[in-house]
Each structure stands twice: as C-alpha cells, then as structure tokens.
Amino acid sequence: MTKNMNTILQTHGIGKEFSGVRVLNNINFDLRAGEIHALAGENGAGKSTFIKILSGLYSPNGGEIVLQDKSVRFENVGMSEKAGIRTVHQEINLVPFFNVYQNLFVGDELTKTFAGIKYTDDAAMKEKTREILAKLKTDLSPETYIHGLDASHHRIIQIAKVLAQKPSLLIFDEPTTSLGEEEREQLLNIIVSLKQIGMGIIYISHNLDEIMKIADRVTVFRDGNLIDTKDISECTPQSIITMMIGHKKYITYHRKEVPKQEQVLLEASNLVNHKLQNISIKLHRGEILGVAGVVGAGKSELAQALFGIDRTTKGKFYLKGQEFKPGTTFSLNNRIALVPEERQEQGLIPNFSVEKNISLSYLKQFKKGMQIDTKQERKVADAYIQDLSIKATGPEQLIKYLSGGNQQKAILSRWLHGGFEVGLFDEPTKGIDVKAKEDIYLLIGALADQGKGIILFSSYLPELLNVCDRIIVLTNGFFNGEFDPKEDGAEEKIVHAMLTGKV
C-alpha cells in the first residue's frame, strides 16, 4: 500500500470469518484526511463487515489496522470511538421528546460544579450545539424538539451528534436513504463541507449517482474481496457496476410501453386524514402506477390508508367497482398486499426463520388439523428461494442474517404466495444493492404483465421514470399532478411539481 502524508487510516490484510466461513479476505485499504472515499458493492459483498471491524463491533481474524500511524486493535465500539472513529448509521437513533442539544449530548452531558455539587451545564451544551449547527449550515435551533422535525433534519442532527465528539474519521452508512431529492442534495452538500474542513470520510451507498458526485475515490467489494480502488475521475457508473457484479454487461430495467387495460382494480376518491388532503387515485389492471414525492409528501400515509392501517375521516374506496371499508383483514382476504417502507420495523420478524416470515400472512393455507404443516411451509419457502434467487443458507436461516435485498425478496414471497391482485409497494428498493434492485424491478414488471395492479411509492425519481406507466405527485398531502414518464421533459416537470407544489 502506498504511503501518503495525509493518510489517516490504513488496513493491511484484514480478514474475518464466522463459524469457519470466510466473509472478508485480505483487505488493504487507506483513507486520507480531507477525502471522501466511497465503498461500493452488492449486499453481502463485505462492506458492512469491514465497517463493523473499523467500528469495533467485530474483531478481525487477521490483519492490522493503522490509525494516525499507530497500530490499533479495537475490542469494542467504545475503543474505536475513543480513537476518533464515528459512524452515522442508516437507522435514525434519536430521542423524540428531547430537543436538539439534549440529543447531541445524551449520555455524555457537559457538567460544571458549584459549591461542590456537579450539575448539567445546559448553557454550555446549547452554545456548543449552535457552533456545530453553524458548521452544518442549518438554521435549526438547539432548543427545537425532535418529534416535530422531518427525516432530513433528523439526519442532520444525527451528524451533529457525531461531530460533538470531535472525530477524525467519519463513516456514513447509506445516509440519504428515505430522503427526497431536495433533502438528499442538502445532506450531500453537508458531507462535502465536512471533507473541506479536513475530515476523512468513508461513504457507503448503493446510489452510484451520489458516489460519482461527491467521492474522491471508490473501493469496490465483491464476495468478501476488495476488487479495486480507483480515483472517481477514472470511473463511470457502468464501470463500477461491472466491478461490483463481475459481468461485462448490465442493463438497467426500463419498462416497455404496454396498452392500458380498462378495468379499474382499485379506486379511492377524496381521501382525507391527518396527512392526506382530498386525494383521489385509480389503479388499472396490469398497470404500474408511481406515486412520487419528497419525504413528508404523504406517500406512506396513502399506502397505509389504502391497505387499511391508517384511517381516513373522509373518502370512498372501491375494489373492482365494489365499495369497501378498508382494513387489514379485508386486505388480506381480498388479495391486497403491502410491502412497507420500513422492512425491519414493519415487514419482518427478525428472529424468525426465512420460511416463517414467508408464511406469516397466510398461515391458514398451511393449517393441517390443529397444527401448521411445516413440510409444506418449507416446500413453499424452498420454491421462492429458488425462484427469486434469495441468497440464504436455507429456509431455516434467521431472516435477520440476510442482506437487505434478500429480506425484501422474502417479504415479496409472502405476498406472492397469497396470490395478491393489488400490490402497494412502498420504497421497495430502499437500501438494497443494484443487482437486487434490478431483480425487484423485473419482478414488478412481470407481475403487472400477469394482470396485477402495482402502486410504486418512491422518493427516488429515476426509479419511477424507468418502472412506471403513470406517475402522480403528492406534495404535503395534496395531489399535485399526473405525468407520463415517457413524455418529453417528464423528469423536469415532476421534479418541479415535487419541490414547488406547482405543476
């Protein structure tokens, strides 16, 4: 490995195995001060394992970590953090009913002593919080409460919380997940500003556009191996994909134009609730309908209202022309499926096996007398593992050990087994790799070709433009236009509607 005067981190021959299975092989990596060094690779490629070693969560089975020219070994997260390594995780971990400054210093409060008594120094914490927020170029107040803020502000506060500990090295793990285009841009600008003040940044993302935009170098992992490290000027999205998947050719999914079928599978008119403001929607048989909007636009609320989780105070619902009252039991019995945005919290039981997660919604189909027919349950799971190329050791593997893309395929398998007709897919490719995304796009297209109706809720516009037949835009709970993704200037028109509230 080439030595550089500004190098703050090096790893030599780092390896890791679990139960005799090698998951990371001979990783040689370096990070410079004032650099954004991106890590790319499919789920299961080894990125997360490598980061967990740097963070002190795992101990390597071999190799050396050199930080600021000193050989180090982290036996726990605390040791890594004390050495100046901090991670901004994909999951938001804030206390909702604390304000900003309290979240920044929770568990590590600044104190002062008066008359021999130690007490919390709120004034010092507020002042320190103001300084950090100013660096991040945000107008947030230290005394603003978290629960009233949107996802992008939560992410900024999460970064501020990390900066309060004065790290020398920052790791960002999929930081723009769930953010709309405007919020995504704001956060990327913040990350670049941290680089400009000399911070060393490791940036993990499945979004190649982001990597091309902000990274200085990119390292690609595949099957536990470090494939190559290149300056970003030497790369294209296609060349990174080629390194990631080991193929020369990779074709991004584009849905072909299909004739519109007349039958309306699902219709809702004039829906009103705590978020939705007079929303009407029609889904035709064989159609993929996109619902676009930034975070907070009302996409998830609409998905949950259609499935029967969120109640409405006004509006009517129709399934194949028949009015109905939405509810989860009705949806399960009438072949309406929901793939929720937050799969970890809303879609999975992490400590259940793959087969138990697949059979979860339709256990009646596996009933044999007073018991569950476990042989049939396993047979069904085996079939979907094969058909959807789910990477698992077998149906009995705990689902929490699968990558994000494979977990999502298992959730889709659950609904496929139920034979759904209407699919409500809320951010179905969130936080998953490029190959798994392609698989899911192909599956959605095939389902529509079979005559099912799919509503794809997404804040990622390129996804909607490539996959959908029609796109509607929501802004702050209001309907804000319908667009043909194939029309000239569709992207600009939709972005304008999403960000300005005007068609």
Image (cartoon, helix red, strand yellow):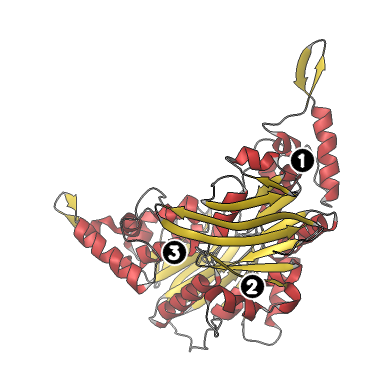
Task: Note whether 298 is above or below 65 in the view shown.
Answer: below
First of labels 3, 2 by sequence position: 3
Q: Which of pointers 1 and 2 indicates the residue nearer the eye?
A: 1
Residue at numbered disc 1: 164
Residue at numbered disc 2: 461
- Residue in the image at 49% along x and 50% along y: 345
Q: Quadrant of the C terminus?
A: bottom right
Q: Quadrant of the N terminus?
A: bottom right
Quadrant hosting residue 275: bottom right
Residue at numbered disc 3: 406
Q: Residues within 10 Å of mark 1 (few under 14, many from 20)?
A: some
Residue type, numbered disc 2:
Leu
Give the structural element (helix, strand or loop) at label 1: loop
Separation (CA) of disc 3 from disc 2 = 23 Å
Quadrant hosting residue 419: bottom left
Measured from the top left, where is residue 185 in percent x and y?
A: 75, 64
Q: State yes or no: discs 1 and 3 in contact (Cβ < 8 Å).
A: no
Residue type, numbered disc 3:
Asn
Left or right: residue 483 versus residue 323 is: right
Separation (CA) of disc 1 from disc 3 = 36 Å
Residue type, numbered disc 1:
Ala
- Residue in the image at 85% along x and 54% along y: 197
Measured from the top left, where is residue 159 in percent x and y?
A: 72, 48
Left or right: residue 39 versus residue 120 is: left
Task: Note whether 48 is above or below 486 in the view shown.
Answer: above
Q: In front here: 13 or 183?
A: 13
Measured from the top left, where is residue 30 in percent x and y?
A: 70, 60
The residue at the far left in this view is: 369
Left or right: residue 108 versus residue 112 is: left
